[in-house]
Image (cartoon, rainbow, N blue to C red):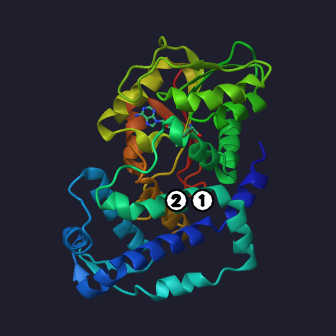
Amino acid sequence: MDLRVDTELLQYISLSRVLTRRVLEFAALEGILDIIDSMGQFTGSQFLTALESKLGYRLSEAPRQRMALVLLDFFCEAGVVELGLTGDYKSIDTRSSIEELEVLSEEQRDGEGLHEEQLEFFTLCIESAPEFLRGGESAYSFSKEHSRVWASFLGNHLFRSLRNILLRLMDVEDRPDYRMLDLCCGPGHGIKDILGWYPQIELVAIDFSSTCNERAINKAGSHRRPALIDHNWRGFGDPLPYGSGSFDAVHFTLADPYIPSELREGFYREVFRVLKPGGVLGTLGWSYPDRERAMITDRWVRQQILAHDFAESVCAGWQGFYGIGDTRSLFSRIGFTECRSFFNEDAILTSALRVLEKAR
Ligand SMILES: C[S@@+](CC[C@H](N)C(=O)[O-])C[C@H]1O[C@@H](n2cnc3c(N)ncnc32)[C@H](O)[C@@H]1O
């Protein structure tokens, strides 16, 4: 399997640089950079208190508090603050980090075009951040009203390429008795790709939100063997409506950060249960960068993950990216074996793609 063409293409993107600039501009406009300058040295909780008292942010609730702390981690990566050994933060250089990002090379401008849908979505999210952080409603949910926004964002070039790499890594067999589950199928981009690569398999797609599935149904309808779209699931925490050992493969992309932490292990145990022995789980989704930089070493990848996490925090149900260490020990506790992943091999793929196997 030759994945070089796809991975080389992904290496040259500049999304991270543009996203970094957007988040820093948000912080400047909101006056957060001035607050950091005026504090000099501070703890995480002093940072939260300052945002509450000076900007009227409502950070007592977990999603908003987490969002502010992700921003602080992002500032560390972007060179705005430094985290000392004692756990205190120190303001370093709040202005020149933005100036440094002003000049984009031609290659980076091309990258901006390539990532139009992502930039559009993240920009909308960042624009909603001031209101959300002051106690406003979530900006986007998985309701019919927002289905267009999700369909555009989730169909972007990077995610499409990653889904296609993942599907090949999963080593699916294109035969009529091969059964795959597309779990949390959303607007149906995965369905289209799966049936494009493997037109003969039996595909079942499920999501807790039936409004998103309407699009999925339309997409699936144009294929020779349409996917069966299942509405019988109330979402994370609800058992999957299938018998044990029902599927050869489960495809689960970009939904892990929506699983509440207390339901996560139970959810993946359900995935394990519905897989046949020898079946595979293919996942796509980033991990929160490890502070030790043992696994996600590239600065721009780290910044991109943190900026993404910060921006998508305004969406209903977003829990944030989970740490790599926790995710890996969770999978091994359940009984999965990691058979193919991209740790430390390629910057943009680092921590994003994983194929796990249920032992025979
Ligand atoms: C970012 S979308 C990803 C969709 C699709 N897998 C893809 O790759 O395009 C996240 C998905 O998680 C689902 N989701 C969000 N909260 C959920 C919940 N509490 N229970 C079940 N699914 C949920 C949404 O309906 C949506 O389909």
Mark 1 vs ligand 1: CB under 8 Å?
Answer: no
| Residue at position x 68%, y 46% in the image | 160
> Does residue 151 appear to the left or right of 33 in the view shown?
right
Residue 198 visible here = yes
Image vertical order of residue 173 relative to residue 302, above or below: above
Q: Amino acid at mark 2?
A: Leu
For residue 146, the mark is none
Q: Which structural element holds mark 1?
A: helix
The residue pinned by badge 1 equals 120
Quarter of the view holding residue 334: top left
Image vertical order of residue 177 relative to residue 79, above or below: above
Residue 348 visible here = no
| Residue at position x 72%, y 64% in the image | 113
Q: Amino acid at mark 1?
A: Glu
Q: CA distance from mark 1 to mark 2?
A: 6 Å
Front-most of residues 38 and 288: 38
Q: Measured from the top left, where is residue 204 in percent x and y?
A: 61, 20
Q: Measured from the top left, where is residue 325 in percent x and y?
A: 39, 49
Q: Quadrant of the C terminus?
A: top right
| Residue at position x 51%, y 19% in the image | 231
For residue 124, the mark is 2
> Does residue 360 appear to the left or right of 103 in the view shown?
left
| Residue at position x 44%, y 19% in the image | 240
Q: Measured from the top left, where is residue 274 in percent x and y?
A: 49, 18
Q: Quadrant of the N terminus?
A: top right
Q: Measured from the top left, where is residue 156 in percent x and y?
A: 66, 50
Front-most of residues 252 and 57: 57
- Contact, mark 1 vs mark 2 (Cβ under 8 Å): yes
> 10 Å neighbourhood of mark 1: few (<14), some, or many (≥20)?
some
Q: Which structural element holds mark 2?
A: helix
Image vertical order of residue 100 relative to residue 247, above or below: below
